[in-house]
Image: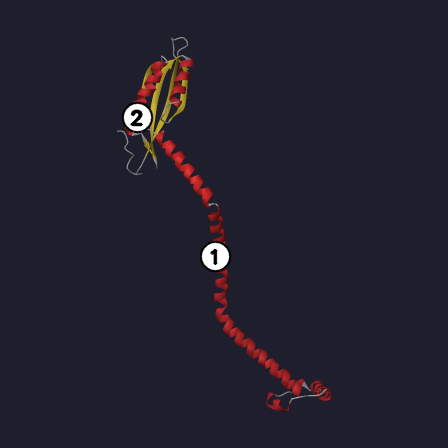
Amino acid sequence: MNINREQWAIEWQRLRDVDWRDLDIKEAGGWPLLLKVLSGCLALLMAFSIVVWLVVSEHRDALRAAQQQEVRLLSEYRSKASEAAFLPEMREQLASLETQMARLRTMLPTGAEIPSLLDSISDAAVNHRLSIDAIRLGSTQTHAHYVEQPLDIQVRGGYHQLARFSADIAALPRMVTQHDFTLEPVEGRGDTLQLSLLARTYRYMDEPGTGGGQTP
């Protein structure tokens, strides 16, 4: 339907002259043309809004959950991508640690080697002309991956002899740590000193919970 400028002006004037308080929906057929058009657009907009609300609201929670999942997956992807970038370096570090662990295990005596370790300590004392008061095993202590074997050592001799003896213990091929040093003069023996110390050696446990083959 074509409407010229004069008709538009007339319809616009009719719309301006409408008393909005007297409008009755039952008389909508007699409303001005522009009012009908505006009412139709308003009704169409309301219907579209209701349809959108009914359709979209059903999927709004699913959309929000999908967006949250997207953020989580992107975070996981970035984390894994970062790990993958450092994977060669991490493998090299792991190989280096395994090599160090293998080397350290060779320094730990087995249960069968404990008597020879005691002999090596006794030989070191004899070589430095020390008097041996005691070199004996203490009670073992079992930990998660190793067994700790204490050694109670008491010897007498000169200061320099005792120092060289302690250095020889530290240089043994098997790992022996030294703790709780006590150094005191021996009465009536001039420059003779008595050295008491607690040494510890360690045995690796291949199967945790088996006791690691402790020495009785």
Q: Quadrant of the C terminus?
A: top left
Q: Quadrant of residue 117?
A: top left
Q: Is residue 61 left or right of residue 165?
A: right
Question: Which one is nearer the viewer's eye here, 204 or 136?
Answer: 204
Question: Which one is nearer the viewer's eye here, 27 or 169?
Answer: 169
Q: Is residue 102 above or below residue 158?
A: below
Q: Is residue 150 left or right of residue 96?
A: left
Secondary structure at numbered mark 1: helix
How packed mark 1 is, by other alpha carbons closer than 10 Å (few <14, some 14-19, many 20 or more), is: few
Give the image location of residue 198, x and y in percent: 37, 24
> Looking at the image, which residue is at 63% across and 84% down?
37
In 3D space, how far apart are the residues under numbered discs 1 and 2 (Cα atoms)? 56 Å
Give the image location of residue 69, x and y in percent: 48, 60
Give the image location of residue 50, x and y in percent: 54, 76
Residue type beneath disc 2 = Ile
* Of pointers 1 and 2, the one earlier in the residue sequence: 1
- Label of residue 114 in the image: 2
Residue type beneath disc 1 = Leu
Which residue is at the far left?
216
Q: Is residue 54 above or below residue 151?
A: below
> Looking at the image, which residue is at 59% across and 90% down?
26
Q: How many marks?
A: 2
> Looking at the image, which residue is at 44% across and 40% down?
92
Q: Quadrant of residue 166?
A: top left
Q: Is residue 72 above or below residue 123?
A: below
Q: Quadrant of the N terminus?
A: bottom right
Give the image location of residue 114, x and y in percent: 30, 26
- Label of residue 4 in the image: none
- Label of residue 73 in the image: 1
